[in-house]
Image (cartoon, helix red, strand yellow):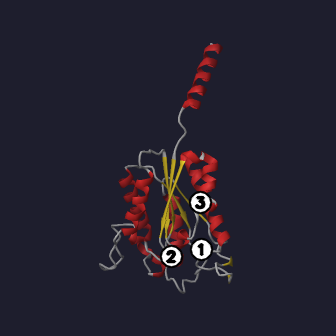
Amino acid sequence: MKSISYLFALSLLVLGCSQDPATHLFILSGQSNMARLNPEDSFTPAVQAEFGAENVIVVKDAWGGQPIRRWFKNWKPAEGDTPIADGALYDSMMAKVDSALTDRSVDTITFIWMQGESDARQSHGTVYGASLIGLMDQLQKDLERDDVQLVVGRLSDFDMDNARFPHWTMVREVLVQTAESYPKGAWINTDDLNDGLDRQGNEISNDLHMPGDGYTIMGQRFADAAIQLIYE
């Protein structure tokens, strides 16, 4: 019996080694803090080191100053009929995704989202959580999947008094709540990433945006969170 068990275990090992490795798609989207992130600085090298460059697809499409209604097509304000959702940025993102998936299939998909500043500024925080879940449902439907993972960047400590962006802390909290309640979700902290020297060499502290090294660290954190979700 021992010899049979040994041969069976050996056959499973050989079978496992002969299987094709999994392929992983990462979709990065959001507004200015995602737009300023260069995946090649830290995110892409991290996931390629973990899974192999040939097994990783990274798609990024981000636009500064844009609310979530530019992605979620069924977005509605808490009251009234305006503003109106258009979903144009979602279509832009999906065009890139469709192109990247030509003649390829993937085993996992992770959606990485750094957005919410505009919704906080425009006081649409009360509908933000439902909108983010709606966006994920929309994405899963279009990708014909029910297992898309979600990683969000929590809004930083830029306006903790809600003086300039009335719903800043609300959206910040909703991002965490949504990620923690999502079946395969995670969030990263950005509070320590918005201090230093900006692109013009000016000293910034608790800024809306980040210095260059802040975006590099953010990319690494996004990668670490995504990798952990894939292994869970």
What percent of the width, then of the height, locates residue 213? 67, 69
User: Position of 214 compared to 136: left or right?
Assistant: right
- Camera-near label (3 vs 1) is 3
Residue 133 x %, y %: 42, 62
Q: Residue at x 65, y 71 (%)?
A: 212
Marks 3 and 1, how far apart at CA: 15 Å
Q: Quadrant of residue 70?
A: bottom left
Residue with the most extreme bottom position? 163
- Horizontal and vertical percent position of residue 193: 65, 71
Q: Which residue was labeled with disc 3?
A: 222
Q: Considering the numbered disc 2 on the image, is that residue within a helix, a strand or a loop?
A: helix
Residue 221 is at least partly visible in this image: no
In the image, is 184 to the left or to the right of 138? right
Q: Earlier in the sequence, mark 3 or mark 1?
A: 1
The residue positioned 51% from the left and 82% from the top of the image is 165
Q: Is residue 97 visible?
A: yes
- Mark positioned earlier in the residue sequence (1 or 2): 2
Amino acid type, mark 2: Glu
Give above or below for 222 relative to 116: above
Amino acid type shown at disc 3: Phe
**Splitting the image into 4 quarters, where does residue 3 fall?**
top right
Tag 1 residue: 156
What residue type is disc 1 on? Ser
Residue 108: x percent and y percent?
49, 47
Q: Is residue 223 left or right of residue 167?
A: right
* Residue beneath the point at 49% across and 83% down: 166
Label 2 sits on residue? 117
The reply to whether discs 2 and 3 touch (Cβ–Cβ < 8 Å) is no
- CA separation in Å, label 2 and label 3: 18 Å
Residue 227's disc number: none
